Amino acid sequence: MPDMNYAWCFDHGVLHRFSPAEGPWCTGTWVQLPGVSEDLALEAKERQYGEARFFDQLTLEQQVMLVEARS
């Protein structure tokens, strides 16, 4: 399996996998996660964002940080 970059998409509510060769393909609100496997990426998501699956489930502070990061 080729190396992958992992990101949690708060628009789709799922873990995305981006091939480094192709780059990100999602235009939603997502955040890149550390980890060399899906399990490690999901653990990092849980530590930083808890059980939030969608954007409106984040705290206001987290929402602002994500919007500013995407600008």
Image: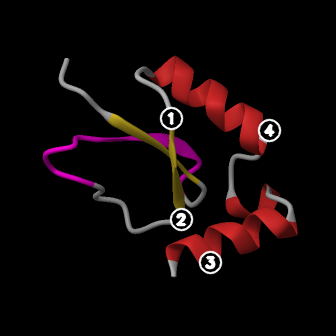
Magenta span includes 37: no
Which residue carries the number 4 mark?
50
Instruction: Tell me which numbered mark, 4 or 1, is placed earlier along the sequence.
Output: 1
Circle 3/circle 1 CB separation < 8 Å: no
Pick the front one: 59 or 71: 71
Circle 4/circle 2 CB separation < 8 Å: no
Q: Nearer the viewer, mark 3 or mark 2?
A: 3
Q: Nearer the viewer, mark 3 or mark 4?
A: 3
- Dot 1 amino acid type: Pro
What whole-number distance in Å separates the C-alpha atoms at marks 4 and 2?
17 Å
Left or right position of 49 against 25: right
Which residue carries the number 2 mark?
29
Q: Residues within 10 Å of mark 1 (few under 14, many from 20)?
A: some
Instruction: Tell me which numbered mark, 2 or 1, is placed earlier along the sequence.
Output: 2
Which residue carries the number 3 mark?
68
Q: Residues within 10 Å of mark 4 (few under 14, many from 20)?
A: few
**SS under mark 4:** loop
Q: Nearer the viewer, mark 2 or mark 1?
A: 1
Q: Position of residue 1 (x, y in %)?
A: 19, 17
